[in-house]
Image (cartoon, rainbow, N blue to C red):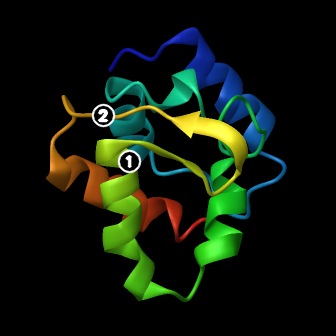
Amino acid sequence: MRFSLPLVASLMVAAPAIAAPPDPAMMELADKSRCFQCHDLTTKISGPAWIEVAKRYRGRPDMVEPLVKKVKDGGFGAWGTEVMSPNKRVKEDDIRTLVKWILTLE
């Protein structure tokens, strides 16, 4: 299994802030999907930290599909002035898997 430098760095930074180690399969899927170009587990880059997304939408299963749509189609306004770029090349099932996982982060 090959990991990129940003992925390894985000794991090292995130380790103290996340209750459980991140799921390696989910981290690999996020890396393959290029999520780490804009997101990190615990630190805001150009997009929100995933831990903040989880806090905002925790306990809201009704938000899974709207979040999948936002990741797939892109959008703006939910986190300030930042723009979520569309991700048309990422499979919708992969996006759904990642969204569900992100919402479990603590």
Residue type highlighted by circle 2? Asn
Answer with left or right where residue 14 lies relative to residue 99: right
Q: Residue at (53%, 71%) from the top-left corner?
A: 104
Quarter where residue 30 is shown? top left
- Furthest residue to the right? 16
Is 39 or 85 nearer to us in this picture?
85
Secondary structure beneath dot 2 equals loop
Q: Is residue 30 above or below residue 69?
A: above
Secondary structure beneath dot 1 equals helix
Q: Earlier in the sequence, mark 1 or mark 2?
A: 1
Task: Determine if residue 97 is in view.
Answer: no
Mark 2 highlights which residue? 87
Residue type highlighted by circle 1? Val
Mark 1 highlights which residue? 71
Answer with left or right where residue 105 lies relative to residue 88: right
Q: Quadrant of the N terminus?
A: top left
**x and y, in percent, of residue 88 in the image:** 21, 33
Q: Residue at (45%, 17%) from the top-left corner?
A: 3
Q: Quadrant of the C terminus?
A: bottom right
**x and y, in percent, of residue 66 in the image:** 37, 68
Q: Evaluate if marks 1 and 2 touch, with contact meaning CB atoms under 8 Å apart.
A: yes
Is 59 or 68 nearer to us in this picture?
68
